[in-house]
Amino acid sequence: MDKLDGQIERVVFRNEENGFCVLRVKVRGRKELVTVTGTVPTVNPGEWLAADGEWLTDPRHGQQFKAAGMRMSKPDTLEGIEKYLASDLVKGIGKEYAKRLVQTFGRDVFDVIENSSGKLLKVEGIGKQRKDNIKNAWDEQKNVRRIMSFLFSHGISTTRAFRVHKIYGDKAIEIVQRDPYCLARDIRGIGFLIADQIAMKLGIAKDSDLRARAGLEYMLGELTASGHCAYGRNDLLSRTAELLDIDLVIIERALDHSVEAKRLIQRANFQGVELIYLPKLYFAEIELAKKLKMLEQGTHPCPEIDFAKALNWVQSKTGIELANAQRNALQTAIRSKVMVITGGPGVGKTTLVNSVLMVLKAKKMRVQLCAPTGRAAKRVAETTGMEAKTIHRLLKFNPGTGGFVHDAKNPLECDVLIVDESSMIDVVLASQLMAAVPLHAAVVIVGDADQLPSVGPGRVLQDIIRSKTIPVSHLDEVFRQAATSRIVTNAHRINQGKSPEFPEEGASGDCYFVEADDPEKALALVGKMIKHSIPKKFHFNPMTDIQILTPMQKGELGARNLNVTMQALLNPRGDEVERFGVTFRTGDKVMQTENDYDKDVYNGDIGRVLSIDNEASELVVDFDGREVVYDFRELDELVLSYAITIHKSQGSEYPCVLIPMHTQHFVLLQRSLIYTAITRAKKLVIILGTKKALNLAVSRAESRDRVTTLAERLKEQG
C-alpha cells in the first residue's frame, strides 16, 4: 500500500452517519493540495494525517488518494495548531482567539488549555467566563472524541457520541462495555439491534441471560411506545423469542429474573390474563385512579349557587342560550369535584367552558387552565381570554430532582383545574398532573374522545369515560352556525362511518377533495397547490397558514419526503447546516421531537429557524417569540415541519390543512386518524389522493386497541 502524510487544510465533506470524508491535505514535497477520501471517526482542519491506501485518478476530480486506513494526531506546526483551534472543535475560540492563543503560547497551547488553563487569562479578550468555557469545551471534546472512536470501531454512527457523553459522562465507554444494551434503553437513535451488534463484538453470547433480559425490556418498551401500558405475558415471551432467535426457556427465565428484581411487574388483569408492566406505567395507572377518586370526595370549592339564577346571568352576559346538554354540564361542573366534558367539533365545548369560567370567576375561585401542548394552551388562552399553560410549564421541571416542582408534597395553588385537549395526555403525564392537584380542588377534563389517543402509552380520556365512575357530559348537538361548515359536518359523518361530502365542481366550500391516483403526481400537485393555488384562491400564507398533515413518516407522501420537497419549494436559499441526514436552513419551519426540560421546549412544539452560526456551531429557533439555542450536535431533536404526521398535530389548529391520503398509507388508515386530521383545520381542508384510501380510512373504526387497565382500576376504587 502507498503511504501519505500531511496537514489537513480543509474538510470538504464529511458524512456524520458513516464517517466518510473528503479532505484537502498539504503533503510534503507536493505543491498542490491533495484530495484524500476515506472513513474516520473524527477529523478537523489543522490535524496531522497519516494514511495508507492507493492513488487513483477520478474522471471528474483528477488524481486523489483513496485511504484504506487513516490516523489523526494533533498538529505540531503553528499554522496547523491555529487551524485546529479555529475549527468548530472547541466552542468559544474561533479564528481571532486561535490566532491570539498561538501568538501567546506557541506550541505549548494544548498543554496550557489542558493543564494550566489559568494562564489563558494572559490573552487579550479572555476573561474568567471565556477561560472556563474554553477549558470545559476542550475537556468535553476530548471525551466525545474518545467515545466516537469507540463507537466507530464497533461500526456505529459517531453522531450519537455527543448524546452518549451527555448521558453517561466520562465513564461512557466503561458503562457501555459492562452492558452495551444500556445504549438501546437510554440513547435516542441507538436501537436494540445496534446495541446487540456491539454486544456480539464484545463477546456477549447469543443465548446469554443479559441479552435475553435486555431483549425483553426492549420488546416491552417498543410495545409501550405504540400505546400499550402492559402486555400479555405469553405474547411478550413469544415475540421476544422470535426477535432474539433463542429458546423460549431462556426468555422465561429472564422474565422471572426481571420480575424478581422489580425491573418488570407481573399482575393478572381483571379477566385473569397475566400482564407484564414497566414499573413506571404500572404505578402511573394506580396513582392516577387513586387520586381521581380522592379528588371526587368532599364538597366542591365553589360556594352554594342558585343554578337557575346563575344560568340566566351567564346567558344574559354572553347573549348565548345554552342547549340542554350544555346546561346540565354547567350544573355538573359547579357541583361535581371531577367531571369530563367531551364531544366533537361545533358542539359548543368552548362556549360551555367559558360559561363555567364566568360562574367560577364570579365566585372568586382561583382557576388554572392547562393543555398538553404549547399550541393547544395558546388556543385555550385565545378562546377564554385567560392565561393557559402547558402541563409541563404548569408543573415546572426541577433539574435538581429530574421531576416536577409541583407534586403531591407541593401542590398547585388553585381551586379549579381545567384541562383541555385531554385526549392527548398519556398515563404518566396524567398521573403527574393529578398528583399536583390540591385535594380541595375540582377538576374539569375537556376533550374529544373520538380523536386519536395519546402518542405516549395509555388512553386516559377514553378509559375514564369507559369506567363510568366519573360524571361525563357528552355534547353531541351540532349548532346551526357550525353546521354550515363542511369541516364540521364531515367530521361528524366520518365519526358515524359515513363518507364525507364535498362541493360540486366549481362550487365554493371549506372542505375539498382532489383526486390524484399516482403518488408522484400527487407529490407534484401538493407542491403546486401550496406554493400557488391555495395562496392565490384563498389568500393563505404557505409558511404560516398552511400545514400538511400526513398519516406516516415514510414513502413519497410521507412527512420526510414532503418536507424535503416543500423546503426546496418554499425556502430554497439561506444559511444552512446538515446534521443527522437533515438540512436545516434559516427560515425553515421545524418541530421539536422530544421533551427537553433544560431548554423548556417539548415534543410537538413548532418554531422557525432564526439563525445558523457555523463558527459557534449553533442554531437558534424562534418558538412563538422565545429564542432557543441548539448546539449542532443536538439537532437530532429537531425535524422539518412543513409536513407533520397527523399524530403530531393533535391539540393544534391551523387556518388551512392539506391531507395527502393514498393507499400507500394502507397500514395506518383508520377513522380516528382522518377525523383528527380534519378537525385540525379552522377555515379550509383539502384532502388530496384517492377516494379508495379515504373510504378505507372511514370504514376502519378499530383504532388498534391498547392494553390498559386504568378503567378497571377506577372501578376497583369504587
Image (spheres, rainbow, N blue to C red):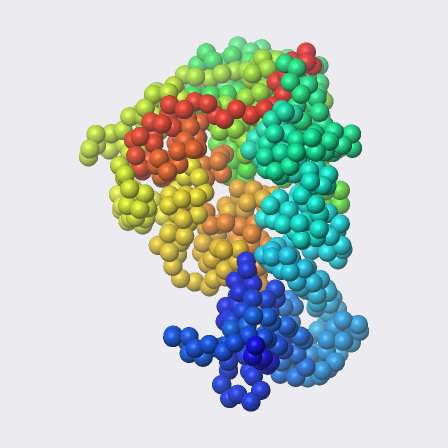
**For residue 708, what is the image quadrant?**
top right
Q: Position of residue 547 (x, y in %)?
A: 40, 42
Q: Relative to residue 45, is residue 549 drawn left or right?
A: left
Q: Nearer the viewer, residue 468 or 404?
A: 468
Q: Is residue 679 visible?
A: no
522 above or below 136? above
Q: How many discs mark residues in the rendered view?
A: 0
* Horizontal and vertical percent position of residue 334: 59, 16
Q: Quadrant of the N terminus?
A: bottom right
Image position of 366 with respect to 172: above or below: above
Q: Is residue 149 visible?
A: yes
Residue extending farthest left: 506
Q: Residue furthest front?
A: 247
Residue at screen point 56% across, 66% down: 39
In the drawing, does residue 709 fall left or right of residue 515?
Answer: right
Report the front residue among 694 and 445.
Answer: 694
Q: Nearer the viewer, residue 185 or 438?
A: 185
* Residue 102 percent across, percent down from the top left: 68, 81
When asked about the image quadrant of residue 205, the answer is top right
**What is the quadrant of the C terminus in the image?**
top right
Q: Is residue 137 left or right of residue 228?
A: right
Percent of width and height locating residue 449: 50, 23
What residue is shown at x 58% (from left), y 79% (from top)?
3
Q: Residue at x 62, y 77 (%)?
A: 50
- The image shows residue 211, relative to residue 38, as above or below, that is above
Q: Residue at x 52, y 24 (%)?
A: 705
